[in-house]
Amino acid sequence: MVLAIDMGNSQIGIGLVEGQTLVMSERVSTDTKKTYIEYASLLRNILLLRHNRPEDISGAVISSVVPQLTRVFRDAVRLVTGQDALIVGPGVRNGLKIRIDDPKTLGADMVVNAVGGIHHYGAPLIIIDMGTATTISCIDGDRAFRGGVIIPGADLSLKSLVAAAAQLPEISLDAPMRTIGTNTADSMKSGIVYGQACMLDGMIRRFRDEMKSEAPVIATGGLAGVIVPHCLTDIVTDPELMIKGLKVIYDLNRS
């Protein structure tokens, strides 16, 4: 089995893949204060709770957008499994053609999503990843990464709004019954949830116009399940896209 770690700013995805089968997928909160011992304990407990033995793990791969935790989690993985994890980054084969101004600046998360998206859904393709930031990536018909956008995520937008406006309360991220809110909480929920959904619909339309293609759309990330159901565009939600992409990259670097 291969252990695949997706380290984001808000959450860490932990997956186990055997062959092409996803055996386990869990998410924990990202905490930059945790030591490798604390993460090792957390990782071992998750594996055992899901009835997976650390000694059955034959390899590991990590994608990280939190540089200060990359080495911490690599050491945790080595302690628990005895495996040296492959870290996605420069020098690691990914099979992706990157046609942007400076390919070295493309984040590991967008690389992995693109690799997983092309492998499982083909091209052209539009990929949305909804976490701390919302990213939208363009994959052209030649299976090349052409560019994208980076937008403040729904949760980040809500936290910023509450922090900046003294009279606005903290609220949950769920959709109200109506778009037009009749109280402060519902007005905020509508603005965040339906506003983000409309933003995605509009950006997808603009992407497709520039791509000159009605490219299918795949959404992933912790907030996709909250926002995407309220979009008017047909969007396939795949919460495990990053784990799938990590396994593809791991396999490419084994050969």
Image: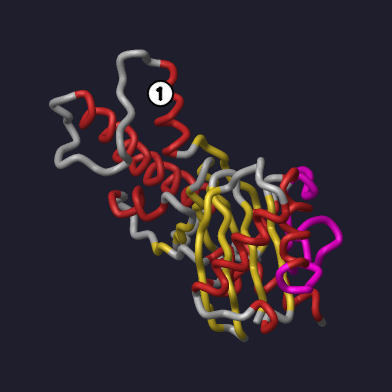
Is residue 205 at least partly visible in the picture? yes
Pick whichever, 240 or 52, lies toward us.
Answer: 52
Residue 36 versus residue 96 in the image, above or below: above
**x 57%, y 80%: residue:** 52
Asked whether residue 145 appears in the rendered view, the answer is: no
Amino acid type, callout 1 = Leu
Q: Residue at x 80, y 79 (%)?
A: 254
In the figure, is residue 144 to the left or right of 238?
right
Q: How many marks?
A: 1
- How dense is the environment of label 1, judged by Cα within 10 Å: few (below 14), some, or many (20 and up)? some
Quarter that holds the N terminus: bottom right
Q: Which residue is mark 1?
A: 161
Left or right placement of residue 229 versus residue 139 in this view:
left
Residue at left offset 64%, top offset 63%: 5
19 relative to 232, above or below = below
The one nearer the camera, 16 or 36, is: 36
Q: Secondary structure at mark 1?
A: helix
Q: Does 81 lie within the magenta span? A: yes
Where residue 136 appears, as percent x and y from the top left, is 53, 48
Residue 87 image position (x, y, % from top left): 77, 61
- Residue 11: in magenta span: no
- Image quadrant where one finds the C terminus: bottom right
Splitting the image into 4 quarters, where does residue 182 fall?
Answer: top left
Along the line of sight, the residue nearer the viewer: 60 or 49: 49
Q: Position of residue 247 (x, y in %)?
A: 65, 73
- Residue 71, above or below 125: above
Magenta part mainly helix, strand or loop? loop
Region rendered in magenta? 80-105
Report the side of 229 relative to 85 (left or right): left
